[in-house]
Image (cartoon, grey):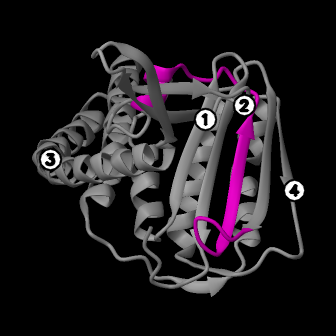
Amino acid sequence: TEYRITAENGENRFFEMAVFPVFDRQGKIESAIEIASEITERKRLESEILQSEKMASLGQIAAGVAHEIRNPLTGIRLGLNSLSRSVKENPRDLDVIESISKDISRLDRVLSQLLDFARKKEPEKEMQNIIPVIIETIGLLEKEAVARKVKINLEKTDECPPVYFDRDQMKQVFLNIMLNALQAMPDGGELNISLQEVEKPAAGITIGFSDTGVGMNSDQLRRIYDLFYSTKKEGTGVGLTVSYKIIREHGGQIEVSSTRGKGTVFNIFIPKTFNATL
């Protein structure tokens, strides 16, 4: 049988137990031998394989859906532009047209994310320091953080080694995770970012994003990388799916733990080597 133990920090550890009877000379069970072993790593690898297979299928579907929707969407936008020129004397009609145009723009952004997810684009990796990318991403979200009363703390370290990564892609990952964290703290809070040099699962660095938001339950955690799945009203359910794909293409890992009502922690591992595979 398999069983799970949840630690105080919310981390799940998985174990497998086999029980064998020991018979006496009369054929009666006089005792039993129990053999237990931890299978957390095996469960993680099984989950990674399942997620990779799911990503491959979703990529094909996403590409087809995005192309099918974008063509009529372009026609609708052109039609609205034409209408807006003919209803200038009616402000109410102009408001309706503007509202529809905003919805079209939002749909177009989702389609762009879908196409980015579906395309097989190899990261253009360079050996570089990742801290400036994190600082740049924080700058992009500075106004959003102030508006939401969220304090972003970066634990900088001069000893953080350079690693191989695609600057634009990694910025996209950080932006998705940090924006999710801000949206998970409607009443304000803190987002703490830390960096640590590690040797396991390979030589590289781990970047931690820890928020004090609403957190997630086990079902939400299980579906967090599913395409179009979002726990927030303003979410599109694409960002984390794309982020997972980018990190895996970098030979890294992305792990998440969360406690409902206490917050969520994302840990991203990026290897030092150029062609790392985990």
Q: Amino acid at mark 1?
A: Ser
Q: Position of residue 200 (x, y in %)?
A: 63, 66
Q: Amino acid at mark 3?
A: Ile
Q: Which quadrant of the structure image shows residue 25?
A: top left
Sequence order check, earlier mark of 1 and 3: 3
Between label 2 and label 4, give the one nearer the viewer.
2
Sequence order check, earlier mark of 1 and 4: 4
Q: Which quadrant of the structure image shows residue 205?
A: bottom right
Q: Quadrant of the C terminus?
A: bottom left
Q: Quadrant of the N terminus?
A: top left
- State the residue in front, 198 or 187: 198
Q: Amino acid at mark 4?
A: Glu
Q: Which residues are magenta?
A: 198-223
Spatial CA span between label 2 and label 4: 20 Å
Spatial CA span between label 4 and label 3: 40 Å
Q: Which residue is mark 4?
A: 155
Q: Which quadrant of the structure image shows residue 72?
A: top left
What residue is at 46 percent from the left and 43 percent from the top? 39
Q: Which residue is mark 1?
A: 257
